[in-house]
Image (spheres, grey):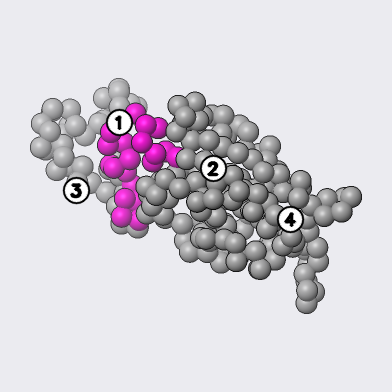
Amino acid sequence: MKIQIISLFPEMFEAVFATSMLWKASERGIVEYSMINLRDYGLGPRRQVDDTPYGGGDGMLLKPEPLVAAIEYAKSQDPSAVVLLPTPRGTTYKQSDAKQLAADKNGLIIICPRYEGYDERVTAWVDRQYCIGNYVLTGGELPAMIIVDSVVRLLPGVLGGETSTEIESFQDDDVSIEFPQYTRPAEFQGMKVPDVLLNGHHAEILKWRNNTP
C-alpha cells in the first residue's frame, strides 16, 4: 500500500513512520510512505498557501490552488488512491472504516488541513471525509497519523499473530471491548490474577472472557 501525506509540516511524521509497527511495515515492503510538502505548491515568491475567508472572520483558510495541485500530483503517483480529509464535517472514524481501507488495499492520500480550515471547493477532489472525535486540534497531522496507524496494523504481515486483529476492542465499532488481560506475576501488591486464568481450562477461560466487560 502506498500512503501519501499532504502537509505543511511533513517533519512531524518522521519519528512516527520510523517507529514500531509502522516502521516494520515499511521495512517489510508492505507499505510505502511518501510526504508531500504543501508549501512546494504555494503561489508566488512567498509560496502562499492561505488567505482570508470571504465573508470575514478570524483566521486563514488554505487556498484551493495549492491543495488541488498537491492532490493531483499525488494522484499521478497512484491513480487508484483514495483521498481522505480529516475534518469535523466528516463521518466519525471507526474501526470498520480502518478495516475497509485496509481490505481495499488501495493507496491512501491524506490531506492535513491547517489554520482555520480549507476552501470548501477542495472537497470535490476528496473521496472520504472523517472526523476522529468531537474536539479541535491545530491541524490534520495527528488525525492523519491515527488513520495511518489504524490501517497499517491491519495489513497482512504487519502484526505477529494470525488473530491479533480479530480479538480486539471495537470489532463491531461501538459495542465490544476486549476482555481484561493479565501477565506475571500472579499476585502484585495484593491484587491477584483471576483464578480461572490460572487453571488451564480453555473452555472456562473462553467463557470468562466472553462474559467479562
Disc marking residue 161: 1
Q: Earlier in the sequence, mark 2 or mark 4?
A: 2
Residue to which mark 3 is pinned: 211
Q: Are marks 2 and 4 in contact (CB under 8 Å)?
A: no
Q: Earlier in the sequence, mark 1 or mark 3?
A: 1
Q: Amino acid at mark 2?
A: Ile
Rounded to the nearest angstrom, the CA distance separating label 1 from label 2 is 24 Å
Rounded to the nearest angstrom, the CA distance separating label 1 from label 4 is 43 Å
Q: Main secondary structure of the magenta part?
A: loop
Rounded to the nearest angstrom, the CA distance separating label 3 from label 4 is 53 Å
Q: Earlier in the sequence, mark 1 or mark 4?
A: 4
Q: Amino acid at mark 3?
A: Asn
Residue 99, percent from left and from top = 37, 49
Residue at (61, 58) in percent of width and height: 136
Relative side of 102 to 144, left or right: left
Instruction: Determine if residue 136 is in view.
Output: yes
Instruction: Determine if residue 135 is in view.
Output: no
The residue closer to the viewer here, 35 or 61, is 35
Residue to which mark 2 is pinned: 3
Magenta span of residues: 152-173
Q: Residues within 10 Å of mark 2 (few under 14, many from 20)?
A: many
Disc marking residue 66: 4
Residue 198, percent from left and from top = 17, 27
Q: Residues within 10 Å of mark 4 (few under 14, many from 20)?
A: many
Q: Amino acid at mark 4?
A: Pro
Q: Earlier in the sequence, mark 3 or mark 4?
A: 4
Q: Residues within 10 Å of mark 3 (few under 14, many from 20)?
A: few
Disc marking residue 145: none
Question: Residue 194 falls in which quadrant of the image?
Answer: top left
